[in-house]
Amino acid sequence: MDLDTSRCYRAISTRDRRFDGRFFTAVLTTGIYCRPVCPARTPRADNVRFYRSAAAAEEAGFRPCRRCRPEAAPGSPAWIGSPALVARALRLIADGGLDRADLPAFAERFGVGERQLTRLFATHVGVAPGAVARSHRSALAQRLLADTALPVSQVAIAAGYESLRQLNHDLRRRTGQTPTSLRARSRGRAAPDPGKGLTLRLACRPPFDVTSLLRFLALRAIPGVEAVSDAGYWRTVRSGDSAATIGIRPGDDDASVMLTVDAPAPEALAGFVARARCLFDLDADPLAISAHLRSSPQLAPLVARRPGLRVPGAWDPFEVAVRIVLGQQVTVRGATTLAGRLVALLGERASGAACGALTHLFPLPEAVARADLVRIGLPRARARTLHRLAGGVASGEIELVAPRGVDDLVTRLTAIPGIGDWTAQFIALRACGEPDAFPAGDLGLRRSAAADGALLSPAALLRESEAWRPWRAYAAIHLWTQGGAR
């Protein structure tokens, strides 16, 4: 979205929530920046400046509003809709990728130099990559202070700060307040009992078709690891050196979900938030995606029926990649059965799970790489494929990320015997959250996309899908949902 001053001002004047997270409004007379939906009195037009991201407003010296809490806004579409390289970098930053590496090493993952990556961020985000990472840490810390009873020392760890002193210094600079004063303002809110877990509200842009997403996940829920119903999604996870249970359920509106973590390790929380956002595709801009796909006569009625459809992502990319390989040449139910056998054979017991159906952790790549997978009913050729995939992930030779794009990931995965284009594209779509991934060889897609109910060839479907770029993954979900989810 271009930051046209008159359009932005009309949006804040009407407090239209469809613009929430698309830009931020900084008020010159107060030194504060807000979301477009802020309930405060609308300032005069000549007293405001508009920024594409919260990080850009903070770098310009503005403090976040205490009423609308910009740190809780959906991710800016300027971040999501920027060129593919920047969008991928932003996803990795949200997952803590820049906290674990310096900027030159981080840039190298994308095949560019540090200076080029910084220039791209300056153009499309408005600030350097480091500023985005710092903004993520600050936003998470403020949400944890406001919404939970987590001790301040653990908030610092959870948000990725090196020390409590660093947290104090950063929040004073950004908000003019200490962690203690930020928490004191929120004492009237119901805080969860630390002994019973921690709950955070994760915002997204409406509309949000959470029902279709939960039904998609329910068909593929791995016995012992996942449990899904219309009420929400639950699973076992690794939290530090132990097991924990997370739950994601719809919020009380169509613009959020609630993430609950049972017995969380503080250092794991930032990663949990990033994984939950990926799994439920919370950073999507449904209005922009729908507007593009509606230009297709074939997709227009499907988009009108489900304008908030999301692409189901992954909590654990390796887990989803294994699930997709298990699904080669079998039904969805058959793949679920095989995944359950794999977990029963190799998964660690998850003691103390909050839900009786959640009994195991999904096996680590090392365990899958050395196991006799024929025992679960796999053909020997597919067992060898899983051995190579798991062994490559365990050794670090194979990374289930796509910093250099879908084509690069597909090339790397199809080098493994037994993984073809369909499998690689499906892994890119779900495990890596690539919005333009498209498994054109899928029978369900070829049948749903045919106007006369026949069967399109993969080549014909690829030609037709060119008009759907860069949102072909969403087109695939619409077609699958129409014809019965794969």
Image (spheres, rainbow, N blue to C red):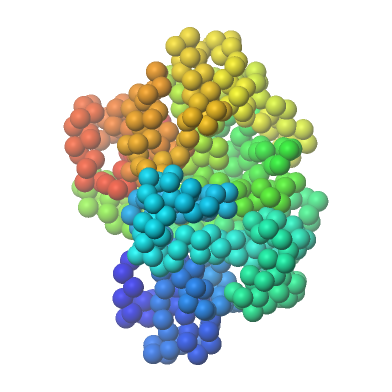
x 56%, y 14%: residue: 373
Depth check, front residue: 162 or 262: 162
Q: Is residue 370 above or below residue 486?
A: above
Q: Residue 136 placed where, x, y %? A: 56, 61
Q: Residue 67 placed where, x, y %? A: 59, 77
Q: Is residue 304 left or right of residue 351?
A: left
Q: Is residue 417 above or below residue 121?
A: above
Count of residue discs: 0
Q: Residue 389 placed where, x, y %? A: 48, 24
Depth check, front residue: 7 or 304: 7
Residue 352 in sight: yes
Q: In this view, does 293 lie above or below 120?
A: above
Residue 18 in sight: no
Q: Is residue 26 left or right of residue 10?
A: right
x 51%, y 61%: residue: 130
Q: Give the residue furthest to the right.
A: 195
x 39%, y 58%: residue: 115
Q: Is residue 309 left or right of residue 471?
A: right
Q: In this view, does 298 lie to the left or right of 483?
A: left
Q: Quadrant of the N terminus?
A: bottom left
Task: Place residue 51 in its image quadrant.
Answer: bottom left
Task: Place residue 4 in its image quadrant.
Answer: bottom left
Q: In this view, does 176 lie above or below 322?
A: below
Q: Residue 249 placed where, x, y %? A: 59, 49
x 55%, y 46%: residue: 275
Q: Quadrant of the C terminus?
A: top left
Task: Place residue 311 in its image quadrant.
Answer: top left
